[in-house]
Amino acid sequence: MPRLIGCLVLGLFLSSSTLFGQGKGLKKTQQTVPKSATATYTPDVDLKSAPAYYRERVIRFRNMMRAEPTREAKIAKARALATNAKSEFRRDAIDFLGEVRASEAVPDLFRMAKVPDIREFCIHALGEIGDGRAVPLMIHYLNDPNEDVRGNAERAFQRITRVTFEYHYADPPAKRKQGIREIQLWWERNKATFKARDETPDEKKAAEESWEKYGRQYLYDLNR
């Protein structure tokens, strides 16, 4: 599945990415994706074309991140915003945590993945981080009623495991069920020894470039 850098709905976009899905909860994309095709999203990095209210919010969020003096401080600030149900920057912060591969935020994202209006963003972020602990959660959400959630779970599962199955988030329920069963059997055979795959060079580069928006002097070691 082609690379995907991150997203957020028009009006929820941070810099880029994202999310799979069609229909009611469709995230911003550059093209209509046939059901049988692999979804491809083009990063939207031109804030000039976004509505003024949205552009101003995104700029304020980025400036908050830039004001924090270290990587650790930026991550702590984003975690606080992401876990605050009243924060206007909640989804921006979730997307940020995924973009910069903030593994320390995984427990927060696990908890927030149960919240209906932000779970698809949390699933996406977990996939970007690539933590193997998220595999069972991704398998669970492959059968979610919401197509956006299923699409993000499928993409996250593939990114973390580097394996593919005869499953597509937009397939009919019976076909999806068959694919999920194959995935579950695979997981039962492999979970005891499973280790998440290392990031590809392109993924490492994308994570580094994400920091451009928040202050390049705070880049960190991606080979952790």
Image (spheres, rainbow, N blue to C red):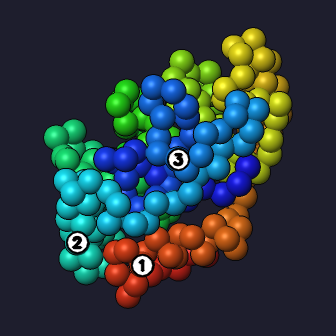
Q: Residue at x 80, y 41 (%)?
A: 164
Q: Residue at x 24, y 66 (%)?
A: 59
Q: Which mark is on residue 48?
A: none
Q: Which mark is on residue 212?
A: 1
Front residue of 94/69: it is 94
Cα–Cα span, label 1 and label 2: 12 Å
Q: Earlier in the sequence, mark 1 or mark 2?
A: 2
Q: Residue at x 56, y 22 (%)?
A: 144
Crowdedness near tag 1: few (<14), some (14–19) or many (≥20) residues, C-alpha within 10 Å: few
Q: Amino acid at mark 3?
A: Thr
Q: Which residue is mark 2?
A: 63
Q: How many numbered marks have been drawn onto this rendered protein structure?
A: 3
Q: Amino acid at mark 2?
A: Asn
Instruction: Say left or right for 159 vs 125.
Output: right
Where residue 58 sits: x, y (%)? 27, 60
Where residue 86 sits: x, y (%)? 16, 40
Q: Earlier in the sequence, mark 3 or mark 1?
A: 3
Quadrant of the frame with the C terminus = bottom right
Does residue 53 sit above or below 143 in this rendering? Answer: below
Q: Which residue is mark 3?
A: 29
Does residue 151 sit above or below 8 in this rendering? Answer: above
